[in-house]
Image (cartoon, rainbow, N blue to C red):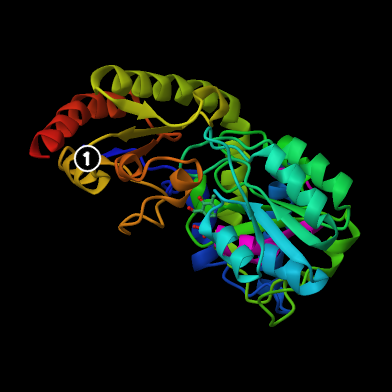
Amino acid sequence: MTHYLDYAATTPVRPEALEAMLPILSDNFGNPSGAHRMARAANQVLDEAREQLADALGCEPGEIVFTAGGTEADNLAITGTVSSLGGRPACSAIEHHAVLDPVEYHDGIVLPVTTAGAVDLDALAAVVAEHGESLSIVSVMLANNETGVVQPLAEIASMVRAAAPQALIHTDAVQALCWLDVAELAAVADLVSISGHKFGAPKGVGALVVREGHPATAKLTPILKGGGQERGRRGGTHNVAGIAALAVAAELTVAERADQVDRVRRLRDRLADGIVDAVPGAIETGDRAAKTANICHVCFEGIESEALLFLLEKADIMASAASSCASGAMEPSHVLAAMGFDRALAFGSLRLSLGYASTDADVDAVLAALPPAVERLRERG
Ligand code: PLP
């Protein structure tokens, strides 16, 4: 039996989302940009999905721009804003590379974080005081993909609004929808990114919420220019089946969230407590109370996570060393580096992330396999 503990990397497609896709892939396969009956039927699927997703995210249907996932939504937010407003972008040092790389490409400012993994508000105050007038966008994720630490977005937004009212606020909510009330917490942001495969829709579909409140959002420059889809904000034939699945999965995720948070938090706490009790020198990252309910992130001195992942896989446990995109690279995670982790300790990091189908059996499997695996690696030196 496979124990999947890598929900922060990706999730299985929910049966309801798959069911929504199948007729669109086979019978109702029209191109929504066309003029005939089948095109109109596809367009109706898009309209319904847009409304359903807007309900789940607490925005207006017209504020949704469908994208090919979280990376594109993040790039559209940063590059689309800098292209239209000029100025400099800023983001936290623990953003996913989908934000960090475009911000650095546009000569942006990278904000430090505390050792607890949250944006350093004193440093932000200094940045907005010094660079406020030149800022065009400030991007801070809602929850970090490696540590699960939830960021103080409301405080960040009010500091930025006061010192740099021209700047847009973007939040990458890709890791948040299953665990946090995105409709409420991201209401302070002008731009919000989500990605379907983190909550039971397929890979390659997501959205950017482009709120109408701030005058600058109307000027967002598309990064994909083409057929004028999404009211000119994102060219390209719609992934109609993926979009239908995205909306169904988002609705279910939001409806079930409170129950899942309680259930998964209990599993995560048992997992994290069990690891810290059984493995000498295991260090849990961040303050658990400030993290999403699903992530258990620990560091082990004296081992390398690549070797640990190999032993866990032999016990049918699928886990991750850092963010999924960075796995395989022999550089310690930029998130742990920004939190001031010792390099050797960062090399021994393990992320176990739970989700809607996780069970006690998954926790038991890790608690049985992990302590002897760490011991074996330490003995090997
Ligand atoms: N942002 C965060 C926080 C993520 O965790 C990820 C994926 O791991 C992305 C963005 C990229 O999303 P996608 O895989 O849909 O391109």
Q: Position of residue 164 (x, y in %)?
A: 85, 53
Residue at numbered disc 1: 303
In the drawing, does residue 1 fall left or right of residue 89?
left
The answer to whether any part of residue 128 appears in the image is yes
Q: Is residue 317 shown left or right of residue 46?
A: left
Q: Nearer the viewer, residue 275 or 21?
A: 275
Residue appearing at x 58%, y 30% in the figure: 257
Which quarter of the picture shows residue 45? bottom right
Front residue (pair 17, 314): 314
Q: Is residue 177 above or below residue 358?
A: below
Q: Residue at x 71, y 78 (%)?
A: 36
Residue that lies at the very extreme toward the left in this rendered image:
380
Give the image quarter of residue 107.
bottom right
Tell me: 206 left or right of 25.
right
Residue 315, relative to residue 169: is it above or below?
above
Q: Position of residue 373 (x, y in %)?
A: 16, 33
Evaluate whether residue 69 shows in this view. no
Q: Is residue 170 above or below residue 117?
A: below
* Depth check, front residue: 52 or 277: 277
Report the residue at 51% width, 26% height from top: 287
Q: Position of residue 101 (x, y in %)?
A: 56, 64
In the image, 105: left or right of 280? right
Marks counted in the figure total 1
The span shown in magenta is: 57-77
Q: Quadrant of the C terminus?
A: top left
Q: Is residue 74 located in the magenta-colored stretch of the structure?
A: yes
Q: Amino acid at mark 1?
A: Ile
